[in-house]
Image (tube, rainbow, N blue to C red):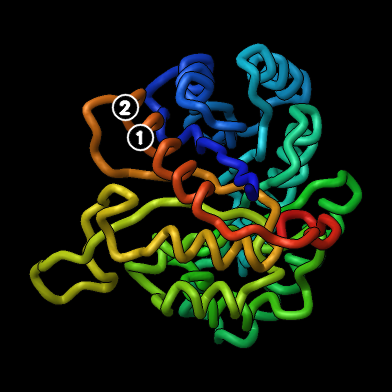
Amino acid sequence: MIAVLLSLYTLLAKDEPLEQAVKLAADAGFDAVDIRQAEDGQHLPNGAPPAEGERVKALVADHGLHISGLTTYYRLGHTDAVERDKHLEGIKSSMDLGVAMGAKYFRISGPTWDPEICYELQRKMTRDQAIQIKEMAAERGLVVSVEQHGGALTASAGQILDLFRDITNANFGIVYDPGNCLREGYERPLVQVDMLAPMIKAVHVKNAMSKAADPPQEMIPVDQVRLDLGILNWPAIIEAIVCGGYEGYFTLEDFSTFDSLAEKFRWNVEYLRQIEKSLPEMPDKPADTGGW
């Protein structure tokens, strides 16, 4: 049977202290946790020193888990030089934190559209910054992933290809998040997998269903729903990704409503493990390239 690595993004337990989030993940049967770092300090503040990463690494290990990644809210593609340098310095600091905590993957956000600058110039600036960031990651043995996300220029698979084609490598790729592009940038999920292929270094798992709303709407309104109740066919998506050779994590980012976090996490692990059991047997996989 193909083994699927399951990770919990601690954002789902952002109202809990990190220790409780990790305990809930362990009790539910996750393999790992993806730690949130943000300006609000939940679960780690921006600027946290490497010593804090070592503490978190020990905490997670005490619960029988490991750290899959460090998720930050730093963004590449800034057109303002001051903001660009601020975010690059933040990324560098957080990369050192990620190394200390034993994280393999490191998330940043994609560029937002700057209407004052033409797309082609912003594209070039984004690519230049991406090259700089992937070199920083290579020096530290990390894999940087830019999240597919609405409200950014990484909403669709087509946009991602246009921004990062020929730049991605073992140390730089994307977070494939088909749930995000249900609101903006939708392409059929299996087409996306085919398009993005080796760029995929991490996968976010959630589902949603479109809903009626008063016009106009810049993005498609949705309700967050359980993995088995939304538009996305997760058994088919996971099979397509895994059968393509992906060896990274499937990280839960389910925003649907359950009676408790404990119930939500247990249900999702059980559902994803059932998908795992249904996957076809595969021949030997290619060498690790940092996710795919």
Residue 82 appears in the rendering: no
Q: Residue 263 carries which label?
A: 2
When asked about the image quadrant of residue 82, the answer is: bottom right
Rendered position, 25 above or below 133: above
Residue plotted at (41% across, 35% down): 12
Image x and y of residue 168, in percent: 76, 69
Mark pair 2, 1: CA separation: 6 Å
Residue plotted at (67% across, 31% down): 67
Please, what secondary structure does the residue beneath circle 1 have?
A: helix
From this viewpoint, which residue is outermost toward the right?
A: 139
Residue plotted at (46% across, 25% down): 28
Q: Where does label 1 land, which residue?
A: 267
Quadrant into which the C terminus falls:
bottom right
Name the foreground residue: 287 vs 121: 287
Rendered position, 268 above or below 107: above
**Crowd rating for badge 1 (residues with CA inside 10 Å; few <14, some 14–19, many 20+):** some
When asked about the image quadrant of residue 212, the answer is: bottom left
Image x and y of residue 68, in percent: 66, 38
Residue plotted at (39% across, 76% down): 186
